[in-house]
Amino acid sequence: MPNIVVVGAQWGDEGKGKVIDLLTERTDLVVRFQGGNNAGHTVVVGGREFIMHLIPSGILHRGKFCIIGNGVVVDPAVLLEEIEGLRKRGIEIDHNLGVSDQAHLIFPYHRALDKLKEARVGPGKIGTTGRGIGPCYTDKAARVGIRVADLLEDDLFRRKLRMNLEEKNALFSKLYQAPTFQFEPIYEEYRGYRERIAPYVINAPMVLNRAVAEGKSILFEGAQGTWLDIDHGTYPYVTSSSATAGGACVGTGVGPTRIDQVIGVVKAYTTRVGEGPFPTEFPPPLMEQIRSKGKEFGATTGRPRRCGWFDAVLVKQAILVNGITEIAVTKLDVLDDSPRVSICTSYRLGGKILESPPAAIDLWGKMEPVYEEHPGWLMDTSQVSCFEDLPPQARRYLKRLEDLLRVKISIVSVGSKREQAFHV
Ligand code: GDP
Ligand code: IMO
Ligand code: MG
């Protein structure tokens, strides 16, 4: 099997976990390359639901080596809890998990800063997951971050933690008038994590590139989605990492010449959690209907997801910036009860038609989506197991998406279970 990058082509929660689970069968290694426990990737196997936040979704398949790459920000408490939680449910985690020694660690002050920053900006907030992701990446870029490797070296760890606390505590007390953090409790807590995490720590670029040299295949598991990407998303309403395909190289140490394919995952409609523009967002009655049918509540925070029609303008741009070669369409079944389905094909802004969205975020609120309408199929698709058995209107809808996006749909998903999907 080739080396494949799987990315979200919308605003996250496209069903990447499910697609990774399907593809893992044919691969040797699965690696997360960015984000942290802001992600929630759901896989439903044998009637049991697993939600992965940090560990690659491939872990549910025995004998596959799963890696948390250098581009990921790791909250050690969450990682250890996830390992234990999976073990309790009978999932083997032993020599099949590796954590990059270059991955950055999330600390309690990152989580506190995340929440304080959001509270301070009030209405202009991003609606983050509050997991400390942004502040941790901020420290990484500011070159003061603490990495997994630093945790293993006691003197280095003490020094870096002290230095960080000095700076952060000044912020907490002076800017936010909030409680400060003491060195000892954090040091002791993280020293406890050291021994438990040490067995998993690896030189990930070495392991991954050796695997490539041995002819093994790698699946790169993206988190979030293209429109949440720090460069290509709806900035500033984005996450703080590179959720696009380029991030797979930076976040793992595997070079671009080793990547064979990029699969973009999209829902048959669109969702978004948190704040920020959303041109095709449904009006209230339709919102409620799709949200309840699609169970659109965040896998990480439980927040209701905002829902809207499929936005082909945004997905087209996602195809460009990721170099997407194939698309997986999920949640087709959620549209089963809709008498009509719409696709946004361009935007109207002040008498002009836009084929791509503007970079200036203020203009997004002034754009009107231009839709084409298609008849719905009004049939249950959740038991369909091949493209030919889909109702003709559903086939036409998917074909129309292929025409508009100029890329092949290779996987269709019609339910949350592992069996409810087929290759096209
Ligand atoms: P991810 O973050 O991209 O991995 O996606 P999430 O797991 O956050 O959200 C996708 C949700 O949709 C999960 O609850 C999945 O179980 C569910 N799901 C995935 N594919 C399908 C599908 O084809 N139909 C339905 N009805 N649910 C799906
Ligand atoms: P998966 O991998 C959907 C959103 C948050 C917020 C913004 C910034 O499951 O698709 P952050 O905590 O990252 O600083 O929040 O990004 N967000 C997600 N939305 N799915 C995700 O992950 C997300 N991870 C972050 O809601 O709007
Ligand atoms: Mg999710």
Image: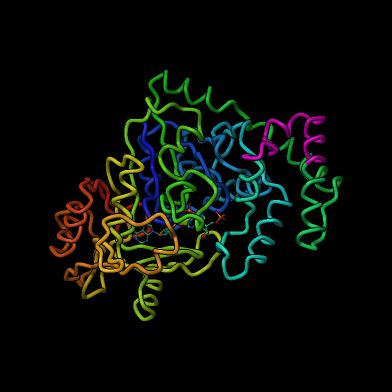
**Left/right of residue 185 with respect to residue 30 in the rendered view:** right
Q: Residue at x 22, y 45 (%)?
A: 407
Task: Name the residue nearer the viewer: 126 or 363.
Answer: 363
Image coordinates of residue 366 in percent, x first then y, are: 37, 69
Left or right: 142 as drawn, with respect to 243 = right
Instruction: Where is residue 206? Give x, y as percent.
Output: 53, 22
State the colouring used for the structure image.
Answer: rainbow
Q: Quadrant of the N terminus?
A: top left
Q: Is residue 153 magenta?
A: yes
- 239 up-or-down from 381: above or below: above
Which quarter of the picture shows residue 351? bottom left
Count how many numbered circles sit on residues in the image: 0
Of 104 and 188, nearer the camera is 104
Query: Could you tell me what secondary structure mostly forms the magenta stretch?
Result: helix
**Which residues fall within the magenta stretch?**
141-163
Q: Is residue 49 left or right of residue 115?
A: left
Image position of 95 (left or right of 28): right
Identify the residue at horizontal 80%, vertical 31% (top origin).
154
Considering every residue shown, the one lying at the far bottom of the view is 285
Tell which of 47 and 152 is nearer to you.
Answer: 152
**Residue 362, image x and y in percent?**
44, 64
Image x and y of residue 39, in percent: 52, 52
